[in-house]
Amino acid sequence: MAAANAPITMKEALTLTSLGINQNFITFTHVTMESDKYICVRETSPQNSVVIIDIAMPLQPLRRPITADSALMNPNSKVLALKAQSPGTTQDHLQIFNIELKAKIKSYQMPEQVVFWKWITPKLLGLVTQTAVFHWSIEGETEPVKMFDRTANLSGNQIINYRCDPSEKWLVLIGIAPGAPERPQLVKGNMQLFSVDQQRSQALEAHAASFATFKVSGNDTPSILISFATKTVINGQLTSKLHVIELGPQPGKAAFTKKQADLFFPPDFADDFPVAMQISQKYGLIYVITKLGLLFVYDLETATAVYRNRISPDPIFLTADAPSVGGFYAVNRRGQVLLATVNEATIVPFVSVQLNNLELAVNLAKRGNLPGAENLVVQRFQELFSQMKYKEAAELAAESPQGILRTPDTVAKFQSVPIQPGQTSPLLQYFGTLLTKGKLNAFESLELSRLVVNQNKKNLLENWLAEDKLECSEELGDLVKTVDSDMALKIYIKARATPKVVAAFAERKEFDKILIYSKQVGYNPDYLFLLQTILRTDPAAAVNFALMMSQMEGGSPVDYNVITDLFLQRNMIREATSFLLDVLKPNLPEHGMLQTKVLEINLVTFPNVADAILANGMFSHYDRPRVAQLCEKAGLYMRALQHYSDLSDIKRVVINTHAIEPQALVEFFGTLSRDWALDCMKELLLVNMRGNLQIIVQVAKEYSEQLGVDSCVKLFEQFKSYEGLYFFLGSSLSLSEDPEIHFKYIEAAAKTGQIKEVERVTRESNFYDPERTKNFLMEAKLPDARPLINVCDRFGFVPDLTHYLYSNNMLRYIEGYVQKVNPSNAPLVVGQLLDDDCPEDFIKGLILSVRSLLPVEPLVAECEKRNRLKLLTQFLEHLVSEGSQDVHVHNALGKIIIDTNHNPEHFLTTNPYYDSRVVGKYCEKRDPTLAVVAYRRGQCDEELVNVTNKNSLFKLQARYVVERMEPDLWGQVLDPENPFRRQLIDQVVSTALPESKNPEQVSATVKAFMTADLPHELIELLEKIVLQNSAFSGNPNLQNLLILTAIKADKSRVMDYINRLDNFDGPAVGEIAVGAELYEEAFVIFKKFNLNVQAVNVLLDNIRNIDRAVEFANRVEEDEVWSQVGKAQLREGLVSDAIESFIRANDATQFNDVIRAASQVNAYEDLVKYLLMVRKKVKEPKVDSELIYAYAKIDKLGEIEEFIVQPNVANMQTAGDRLFDEALYEAAKIIFTHISNWARLASTLVKLQQFQGAVDAARKANSSRTWKEVCFACVDAEEFRLAQICGLNIIVQVDDLEEVSDYYQNRGCFDELISLMETGLGLERAHMGIFTELGVLYARYRSEKLMEHIKLFCTRINIPKLIRVCDEQQHWKELTYLYIQYDEFDNAAATIMNHSPEAWDHMQFKDVSVKVANVELYYKAVHFYLQEHPDLINDLLNVLAPRVDHTRVVDIMRKAGHLPLVKPYMVGVQSNNVSAVNEALNELYVEEEDYDRLRDSIDMYDNFDQIGLAQRVEKHELLEMRRIAAYIYKKAGRWKQSVALSKKDNLYKDAMETTSQSGDRDLAEELLTFFVDQGKKECFASCLYTCYDLIRPDVALELAWMNNIIDFAFPYILMFLREYTSKVDDLIKDKEAAQLEVKSKEKEEKDVIQQSNMYAQLLPLALPAPPMPGMGGGYDPGMAGGYGGMPQMPAYGMPPMPGMGY
């Protein structure tokens, strides 16, 4: 059957692999699909993630890095459920997240593992464990609730589905298990059905099941059905059944009859079984899907087979219902997501023709409203009607597909049936059946309502309308209006009968609803008439109505001026104000006159209202000078200031500070310019400086930045207001860093007596000029010196301060400063006092008063500088007696002792606290020996060396240096640049070192000489110490040092020292001798100490005499010595001698070097001997491996075979590889065969040209690399049959496919390669790369097969790669097809246009063009069609209409000169109201003189150049065109031009209507005069009526009387008189009503007063009378009861009323 005629259509919705999903993750455990909205894929590599695919937007998958064992998307919303096993447990952790809100909804830790879970409703998750089933709601904080335990038949089953019915009363759990032993390949299915109400389970055999609802004929509520499919082996026979059963039949109602049917599986699908079942409620069909891709379709009601077909060649493992289309989605192992839907056009004909089941066809058509059964339904209806089965006929007509019987003919047919006595009318039966089935159409509703209205059963109509059973129409409303106007209004609204709705609202005086409704439906009533009508009856409603008009889209239909005048004519100021305040909120420039008007009327009548309006700041376009004058007259001075713009006006008003709020005035100054603000401030100071000073200071503070601080300071200084200057600068001082500001503030504070503030600023501020401030304070001579102290102390003017205070006899401030403020500056004070010749007693007392707080060092410096150091003796001794350890104290005391020569040596050696450098420096010029004592005590090396050098005290220096033992000091004194080095060395050798008995001092001295590179001096010194029987003669270190020094400085002495000395380190000295090339001396040393190995090494490595070494080895006969000889022989290339030496040494450690040397000289015979010896001592893989290699080199293959079967530790693989690399293939073959390394064996056989054996070995190896090697070798040898065998095993690996292809192609084997790829398509492991590579080969070498290959295997091809190849090979048609399949619609469109002779197809191009993303391609396509296919351009543009810029398209066609060509397109898109389209169509209509369409276009679409079009057609030769010009002028508001054009063409009616709509009085009177001048009396009368509101009565009467046409004006006069008499009557009534109200209030007040007086006479005199209502002071029970205990109002101090007892 052709796919187009099949009842079920299948299409690929998407492919998961094309979205980047790895094929390995397309499995039942990784993919979930809970509904037709989302697919969820769980990936575990390259990283753990979850991919969420929205079916509506499949190309935008959402990938999130999530680690979970399972993931489920909610069926309806973006809610994700995740399940993961807790580490180290068998428990599962469940979490639910809202992806859009990025929030976790809830989570739960399951105590046992969840083996299956599923969303059974959008709010409920079903959780299946090994033993039970739970339900978990996502709402609230509830935990999972256990529903039932699993039955025994599901034990050990894999759960594949879990479902519930819509009522959640029935649950079904489905699992599968391995098949029976007699047929294990057939999977067994088990099902558990559970009733929530009965709490009972039933175990059944079933592979798939689903719930459905079905309404049985005669029942009010639908029945719950379950359908399940089974496939079992009974008595050795396969039985496949589909069952449909009702669950919980309704008591007393008709039950659904149980149905069953066979499932027929073809022989090839004998082991196939159902995996899923979906039921379409839309069509009443059951879909059964099997694992191998079979689809069975059955009718739900009858279980009749409808269709069967294979829908997927790959196994299906997942399905989901698609209720919106009545089908289902299925996912197969290839990753295809298939959508199955009902072919509505063919299913009914298929059932009726192919299946010959007419009843089922009709039922399907009725159930799904499907076409194809019209003739059957009509025929059946006629049969029932002829048989007088009216009820059945009515039901058939009601359920007829697509309403083919719901026609007036059917109604007439039922009306024509005579009513039998005692029976219901067939017509009523028909309508009753329609009402139970659904909604009536317009004709049926009208006919039924007519019957009901005639029977006066209005309540039935109300019920039907409430239930939306009737289709409303204007005719139905007219019918119902005769009995119920409210119901008629509802019908009119539903029927959108706009004029009738407006009329109904007007009758009900619901004018506000008129506006709302008119806006909703786009209706335009006469608003001015409605406003005038409401104003006469309800002014408040008129305001609301006017406001509603102002808020209409497109602006108010009535001008605001007209509305305002209507209110003001009736003296309705509050209403006019309220209206204007609302409509003027946007604050537009064109409303300036109205803004001025509303402010004027309120400033004159209600100034407080005007003040509030101005305070809100809602207006900015009114006449400000006019408003300013009115504000000044009304006493609103602040508002006047805000509006005046002239300085003189502002200065006149601003002095009224008594009536202006100070804060507001300050804010006003912020709006003035700098100069004006300063002028106003001067004005205020001139008028009342004392009274206005506070305001001026506040202004200066607020706007100091704008006015400038300097200007404000000058202003205050001009009026000598230091007080103002003080307050002004005080506010900005903390924010300013200007030194001038800070100084001015200090000056002002000082002059106003603010001494504390002066003290604070001088102490805290960092910005004033210290010098200037110091001088000012000294000149000011303030009684309090603290400010001056602050300045001088902070900025280093302490001497000046001391001098000032001493000179002014302010000694107590000196003491206070030193003792309390800053004792650290006492030395400066003392120094200045000494300079000022202050008495020493005062200075000593001052020093002692500070004592320990005084810094000693600067004090000593000040006194020492003035040679008055002795002044401090008492102070220093006092500090020492207190235990002071201050170094400066002891330094000063030491200097005094040195100067007085009072036993200075004792002080220098015993005092531990003084600084040696300071005191030593002080002693250098007085006594150098004292300086040396001080420096020695402090280890001041450099200073001591300098003073001894300077004074030639070298003996002291030598003793100090030897005792010091400091390497750096030795380096300094032994420096060659030191001119005194020789003198020092002489003293060290002659005096200092002989005196020393300390070995460490000797050692340090020797090291120093060595470091200073003085070998000869050192040898002289050491000989004196070591060889002359001193205390250090036997010292090993000194002996070593003597020999080493001789080695370095005098080698001729070395041998003598070796013979004379015995206590040196022989090994170390010997190595040093070798290093110094004294080989014979080294040999003697090693022999002397019996170091034979080192001795032979000297002979071999240094003397290089192998013969002497062999002789020495024979003499000592040590293995190690022979080993060293063998190594040397090996180095010299004496391989055989070396092997013999190693054998004598029994040394197996050097086998690596022996093997390497033997290999170089091919001494494999000797090597075999050596290796056999080595194998006896060590078990080393390399030894055995080398032995194999040696055997192979000497061609002893037999020994190799014997060796490898014996125990050995050879690395066979490495040995074999080495043999292979060195082309010893036969030996390598033995090794690889022994170790079963088939890959290397195959390579070896290839080298040996044994290809068949190589293929067999490669098959055993099964390695891609091996297959490639053998394959390539076979290709090179033209063994293509064997090459193909190898190639088939290679190309299944994606990474190796391209290499094989390139190898074949590089050698020109194209046919063989294509044959290989074609054979590879049939492989079970065939992958996308094979299909893609074959496509590439077809594109290059067999282009005729390319398109067929692409179409067959499009989903399995790597499309981007093939696209590149097709582009290179210029296969444009195939390239286009690939672009479309890959959703590269932009490139597809570009390819079609660039290569249209080969690639263009109109239908295909249309499909592609609507999907492109680059909008420029739309316009390129327009150019393309204009050039090549102009006859189809409208078809293309209609498709592109929603996407293109219509203006640009019109511009393209206009430039091309083919605008008429796209007229159909422009008509189609004109509904968008685009200016360019409107103008282009209007141009065409003008050219075609089609004025009807031109007017329609103008009326419906107003976005065009109206004036330009009007000017173009106003001179057109056709009258209708000129009339259109007048109409356009009218729409554009150019009333005069429109009227003039209408008058010119004698279109007087148009002229009058235009004038009336303009609202222009002058234009109306001008038109009236025109009619008089032209003698158009009838037009004169008509104009008076049409323009009644615009024409003044005196003008009309004057024209009528002057031109003797008073009769034609008489209707107008009557109308005018009637209107004004009505107005007068209304005013009189209002006045009378007001007078009556005043009289009534007066009477009530008198009665209350009289009653109060009477009450007061009855009470004792001591009690007060009850207060007047509203005056407070008492309690009124009536008031409390009436107002819920409202608190009493205060009396506000009112005097007592006379006669009331006060």
Image: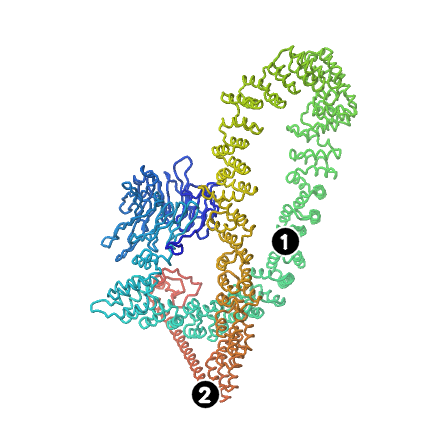
Tell me the kind of residue under disc 2.
Asp
Q: Quadrant of residue 178?
A: top left
Of residues 683 and 1578, the one drawn nearer to the viewer in this rendering: 1578
Label 1 SS: helix
Q: Position of residue 735 (x, y in %)?
A: 62, 51
Drawn side of residue 1496 relative to residue 396, left or right: right
Looking at the rendered structure, the number of numbered marks drawn on it comes to 2
**Is residue 581 visible from the viewing direction of this image?**
no
Tell me the kind of residue under disc 1.
Leu
Residue 1214 is labelled as: none
Image quadrant where one finds the C terminus: bottom left
Drawn side of residue 1537 relative to residue 328, left or right: right
- Within-10-Å neighbours for mark 2: few <14, some 14–19, many 20+: few
Above or below: residue 592 compared with residue 1552: above
Above or below: residue 1652 compared with residue 1256: below
Drawn side of residue 538 relative to residue 937, left or right: left
Residue 1607 is labelled as: 2
Q: Are marks 1 and 2 in contact (CB under 8 Å)?
A: no
Q: Position of residue 391 (x, y in %)?
A: 25, 63
Image quadrant where one finds the N terminus: bottom left
Q: Which callout, 1 or 2, points to the residue nearer the camera?
A: 2
Q: How is the image coloured?
A: rainbow
Furthest-bottom residue in view? Answer: 1604
Q: Quadrant of residue 1227?
A: top right
Q: Tell which circle, 1 or 2, labels the residue nearer the N-terminal end.
A: 1
C-alpha separation, residue under disc 1 versus residue under disc 2: 87 Å
For mark 1, what is the residue? 729
Q: Position of residue 1291 (x, y in %)?
A: 50, 41
Q: Position of residue 214 (x, y in %)?
A: 30, 54
